[in-house]
Amino acid sequence: MSSDRRKKILDLIDLVPTLPLAATSVLKRFDDRDVSVDAIARMIQKDPSLTVSILKLANSAFYGFLGRVSDVRQAIVLVGLNQTRNIVLAVSLIKLFEGKHADGFKVGGLWRHSIACGFLAKKLGEETSIQDPDGALLVGGLIHDIGKLVIYQYLHHDFRKIISMIQQHKIGFSEAEKDVLGYTHYHIGAELLRRWNFPEELIAPVFFHHSPWSDSNHPHISATVYYANRLTKLIGFPSYEKEPEPELSWRSEPESRLFLQKNGFMTSNRDIMPFLQASHAQMMSGGSDLFSLVSP
């Protein structure tokens, strides 16, 4: 990336407020060698919003406990400290970028897409036996499009141009962003997370979710989020409802199919369609509570 383009991104990110104090205090506590479940639970419980969000996640289809988790300490024990840390990061971002829709773009729709992507990434990881002790697949899916919200909230005039190009020329976000801004939502999202000292395994799927074959450090995470992102749109959860209709990537991009197969993913319709049908049913079931994280 050119120094001029990077400066533009950094100038934009300087406009974004930092994570809430309650969240940063909790995150700092995770860095202590003597950190305990009880200490983290006490700190999280001081923030009612964070408490509710973590309990919603623990009781959702993400983890399958479905109403059996009654308090924060129990949630941390079941999920694990490392995954709890990453959940705090993700939930804090969601709360920071909540907002109303405008100009035909619905922030809630983007978050629904992101939640569905996180769910599918986690399920794909389980199907492929990917090692993910810190929950990077789930969280990477949740935050992969965070750069779109930065553009939406802080470059609103340019965002309207991007939306217009998507509608008129039937192209995707990245292509329209390059034309209007000269850079993309994944550049912005990754730089934001880097400035906020997010772990590299969470920055990677944000930066590489359109080109996981370029990720040499966390390719399994980026590849899974990439595939989940594509599949999420197929089952009716686009980040923007007027994006071009998606195709299964290998129908137009045979190299993607080979890449996915090399990484152990199922790619035949015979395998992927039942997986998607079952995942969609689980997401939409009344007891899953999957999308309540972004509900009023």
Image (cartoon, helix red, strand yellow):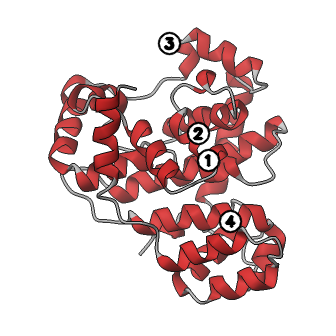
Q: Which amino acid type corresponds to the residue marked 2 in the rendered image?
A: Pro
Residue 85, numbered label: 4
Residue 252, numbered label: 3
Vertical order, 99 against 175 (above or below): below
Q: Which sits earlier in the primary sequence, circle 1 or circle 4?
A: 4
Q: Which amino acid type corresponds to the residue marked 4 in the rendered image?
A: Arg
Residue found 42% across the figure and 66% down from its top? 18
Q: Nearer the viewer, residue 95 or 40?
A: 40
Residue found 81% across the figure and 70% down from its top? 33
User: Position of 139 compared to 109: left or right?
Assistant: right
Residue 146: where, in percent of width, then height?
A: 44, 50
Secondary structure of the residue carrying tag 2 is helix
The reply to whether dot 1 and dot 4 touch (C-beta < 8 Å) is: no
The reply to whether dot 4 and dot 2 touch (C-beta < 8 Å) is: no
Residue 257: where, in percent of width, then height?
A: 64, 16
Q: Nearer the viewer, residue 122 or 152?
A: 152
Q: Tell me the residue that label 2 is attached to.
A: 205
Q: Residues within 10 Å of mark 3 (few under 14, many from 20)?
A: few
- Label 1 and label 2: CA atoms lie apart by 6 Å
- Foreground mark, 1 or 3? 1
Residue found 46% across the figure and 74% down from its top? 20
Vertical order, 105 against 244 (above or below): below
Q: Residues within 10 Å of mark 1 (few under 14, many from 20)?
A: many
The reply to whether dot 1 and dot 2 touch (C-beta < 8 Å) is: yes
- Foreground mark, 3 or 2? 2
Residue 202, numbered label: 1
Q: Residues within 10 Å of mark 4 (few under 14, many from 20)?
A: many
- Label 4 and label 3: CA atoms lie apart by 38 Å
